[in-house]
Image (cartoon, rainbow, N blue to C red):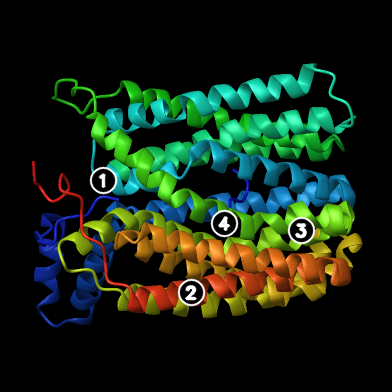
Amino acid sequence: MPVQGCRAPPTAAVMVPDPTTLDVERNGRDGSPLGQVRAWGGRGLAGMLKSLRDPTSPLMISQFLTAGVAFVANIMASRALAPSGRGELALLLQIGYLSSLVMMLGTDRSVLAVYPGAPPRTVTRAFLRLLLWPTVIGLLVAVALAVLPLPGLGSWQLRLSTAAVFAVVNSLIRAARSVAIATGQMRAFIHCTIIEQVLLLTLVTGLWINDVRSSAVWVLAYALANIIPTGGYLLLWARSTLPGTAPEPPAPDHRRRAARSEGILLFPAAVATSGMLRLDRLLLPAMASTAALGVYAGIGTMTEVLTWPLFALADARLGRWRQAHDDGRLRLRPPLLATLGYSVLAGAFFTVVIREFAVPLLGPAYVAADDLVAPLVLASMVYGLSQILVTMLTARRRNGLASVCETTGFAVSVIAYLVLIPRYGALGAAYASLIGYGSSLAVAAVALVLAPGGKPAPERAGVT
C-alpha cells in the first residue's frame, strides 16, 4: 500500500496473573543469576505478548511492513520512470488520495469514536452502507474518463481514469483499517497487510524488471495489489459472526448517522491535513515541473515514513482516549512526551540515513535532492506531532477545533506554496510544508491548553 498519507477499544485495567509465567517468577526468587535471568525473560515475554494484544502494536507492525515495501517500490519507480515519470506517478497517486478523502467524508476517523468494540459484522456493514454511493460515483467517473472523448485531456484521460480507480480502492483500504481498529481485528489486519505488500512488491518488481515506463500501469499495480486482500477481508467481516453467538440485529441507525455527522465535522480537518500533505505534489508540476516533483517525491516518500508510527498511535488510541475523556481520566502528558522523544530521535536518524543513501539508491538524477532532506525531515516531525494533538482534541470531543487547526495549517501552507514554489521550486515546497505544519501544530497546542473538553452525547452517557 503506498504512502498515505492515515486511525481501539479499551482494555481492562485489572491485571490478571499469567499462569505461563508463574514458574519463572517462582524460580527467580531464589536469587541466583540464572533464576533472575529467567524471571526477567519471563516478564519480558509476558509483556511482549500483552503488547501484541494492544492495537498500537499491530498497527506499528503494519506500518513498518508497509514502509519497507514503499521504500523499495519508491526506489524501483524512481529508477524505472526517471524524475519526470516518477513525478507523474506521484501526481496520480495524490489525486487518488485526495479523491478518496472526499469519498470518505471523515468517516474513517468518526467510526473509531462511534463504534469502539462493536462486532465486525456491525461496523463493516455500516461502513459499506456509508461508502455505497461514493463508490458507485467513483467507478462511474473512472469509466467515463476511460471511454468518453473528453477534449483537452489527451493521454492524461486514461491516467486520470486509473487515479479514479485508485481513489475507490484507497477508500476501501481506509474503511478496512478503521473496521479492524474499532473491532479489534488486528491479527486479520496484519494478515491483510502482509498479502497486500507481497502482491505489491511482486507487481512493482515485475514492472521494474520489464522496464515499464507508463505511470498509469504503475498506479493500476498499486490498486490491484490492495483491492484483492482488502475486498476479501471486508466481505469476510461483513458476513462473520462471533463464535457461539447468533447473528446480531442490524446496527441502530443512530450510530451510523452519528458516524456520518461526526465525520462531516472532521472532514474539513481531513481535507486540510491531506491538503497540507499532498497539495505540494499537486502544485509542483504546475508551478515547476514533473521532474521537480519526481525528485521531491523520491525524498518525501522516505521522510514520510517517520510519521507513520505516530499515525498508528493516534489511530489506535482515539477510541480509548475518547472513553478515557468521557470517564474523566484522560492524561495527555505521557503520550505527548513519548511522541516528542520519538520525533527527535527518529528525525536525527532519518536525516543521517537519507543523506547518506538517497542518491546511491535512487540514481544520479536525484543528486539535487540532498538539499531537501533536512527541511522534509523536520516537516515530517512537526506534522506527526500535530496529528497527535489534533487526535487528542477529537478525543476530547472538540471536533470543530480539530478542523480549525488543520484548516489554519492548510491555509498557511497554500500561501507559502504559492510564494515559495515559483521562486525556489522543490526546496520552496519543502519549506512551505514545514511552515504549514508548524502553524497547525501551534494552533492545536493552544487549543488543547485553553479549550475545555466537550461532553458526550446523551445516548453515549447512557441517557435514553
| Mark seen at residue 74 | none
Disc 1 marks a residue whose amino acid type is Pro
Q: Are marks 4 and 2 in contact (CB under 8 Å)?
A: no
Disc 2 marks a residue whose amino acid type is Val
Question: Mark 4 sits on what residue?
Answer: 272
Indicate whether 257 appears above or below 412: above
Q: Secondary structure at mark 3?
A: helix
First of labels 2, 1 by sequence position: 1
Question: Mark 3 sits on what residue?
Answer: 298
Q: Are marks 4 and 3 in contact (CB under 8 Å)?
A: no
Residue 179 is situated, as x and y percent measured from the top left of the image, at: 37, 39
Q: Secondary structure at mark 2?
A: helix
Indicate whether 448 appears above or below 231: below
Q: Secondary structure at mark 1?
A: loop
Disc 4 marks a residue whose amino acid type is Ala
- Along the horizontal axis of the image, is 8 left or right of 431? left
First of labels 1, 4 by sequence position: 1
Question: Mark 1 sits on what residue?
Answer: 116
First of labels 1, 3 by sequence position: 1
What residue is at 52 percent from the left and 56 percent from the top? 64
Q: Nearer the viewer, mark 2 or mark 3?
A: 2
Mark 4 and mark 2: Cα distance apart in space: 14 Å
Mark 2 and mark 3: Cα distance apart in space: 30 Å
Residue 162 is situated, as x and y percent measured from the top left of the image, at: 72, 30
First of labels 4, 3 by sequence position: 4
Mark 4 and mark 3: Cα distance apart in space: 23 Å
Disc 3 marks a residue whose amino acid type is Gly
Q: Is residue 187 visible?
A: no
Mark 2 and mark 1: Cα distance apart in space: 28 Å
